[in-house]
Image: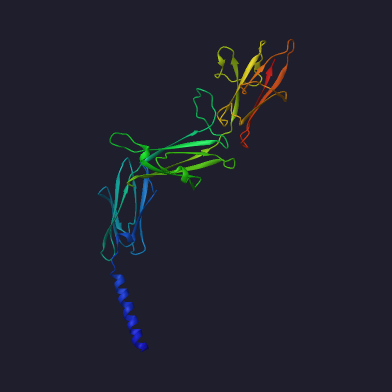
Amino acid sequence: MFRKYSILILILIITLWGYSLNAQVRSTDIVLEISPENPIPNQNVTAKLSSYVTDVNKAYISWLVNGERSSGGVGKHTFSFDTKNLTNIDLTAMIETIDGQNLVKNIKISPVNVDMLWEGYDSYVPPFYKGKAMVPSEGMFKVVAIPNINTVNNTLNTNNFSYTWEKDGQGQSNSSGWGKNSFTFKNSYLERGNGINVKISNLSGDINTEGNLTLGTTKPKILFYEKDPILGTKLDTTLEEGEFKIKKEGSIIVAIPYFISPKKLNSKDLAFDWYINDQKTATEEPRNQINLKTVTSQKGTANLKLIVNNTKALFTGVEKEMEIDF
């Protein structure tokens, strides 16, 4: 009886082994991957075939780009190419396995550039300032993603795409979704910078791309200006230490706290503390300016200092001082 069962088991093993040798390899048994996953125009891309069912190292593989054969050979399971300025790429791998089976793997690629723009969402700069409002520690960033896709009429509706945002590798589900091409967030005082990534796709799934950038904070700074009673604040000339003398009729000095947050200087969250020779001095509105007057027949120098703090943030304080003559 034991011998009989042994023979049956042996026959079953031989049968299954023979079946496995002649098993049909399916296209889904082979994986085609590209790196980078979402290429951009004029970028080198590497395609790779892999399988646990058949040995791609022994298969004859032909690679076609938009229907034209670009490379091929036995064991040619990797292939590199340049996306150039093509808007659509049809990459095909034709595989002839060692046992004579023919398979085809195909992937469609739409190289898309993504412009990543950012601004300080709540950072102060004076009117007509030509530069960008930088962001202080614990300040607000706003990032906008704009996919550059060539269309027939050169128009693009950014609302027709899905945007998946990440900050420092963490998904931002509340800021992600259809048409959400902007992402606003607050920097933490524990973070010197932030890495932002966005993945973009359309409804049909034939366009997939991504963009990323690294953002850093900037320490606020104060610059002093003189205010003319008629012309207003002379923003074209800053006051340098030791070079300013108070006029006989008095002078008004205006302080501009560049990149302080919030950007409304009359906000209750901002504290302006003026000091003359280390003595705190009361000032009237607006809080970012001080009226200086001389005492008759007295001459000398004095130290003027301003400290600006955001009372709801830990490390956003900034100060500036200068020597003035009278």
Give the residue at x 30% y 46%: 89
Between 303 and 126, the residue placed more toward the observer is 126
* Residue 297 left/right relative to 249: right
Q: Position of residue 83 (x, y in %)?
A: 33, 44
Between 298 and 121, the residue placed more toward the observer is 121
Tell me where residue 252 sits by quadrant: top right
Instruction: Identify whether 80 is placed above or below 306.
Output: below
Instruction: Identify whether 41 is placed above or below 94.
Output: above
Tell me where residue 295 sits by quadrant: top right
Q: Position of residue 19 (x, y in %)?
A: 29, 72
Q: Position of residue 131 (x, y in %)?
A: 50, 27
Q: Quadrant of the N terminus?
A: bottom left
Instruction: Identify whether 206 is placed above or below 130.
Output: below
* Residue 52 left/right relative to 231: left
* Residue 133 left/right relative to 223: left
Between 173 and 7, the residue placed more toward the observer is 173
Q: Quadrant of the C terminus?
A: top right
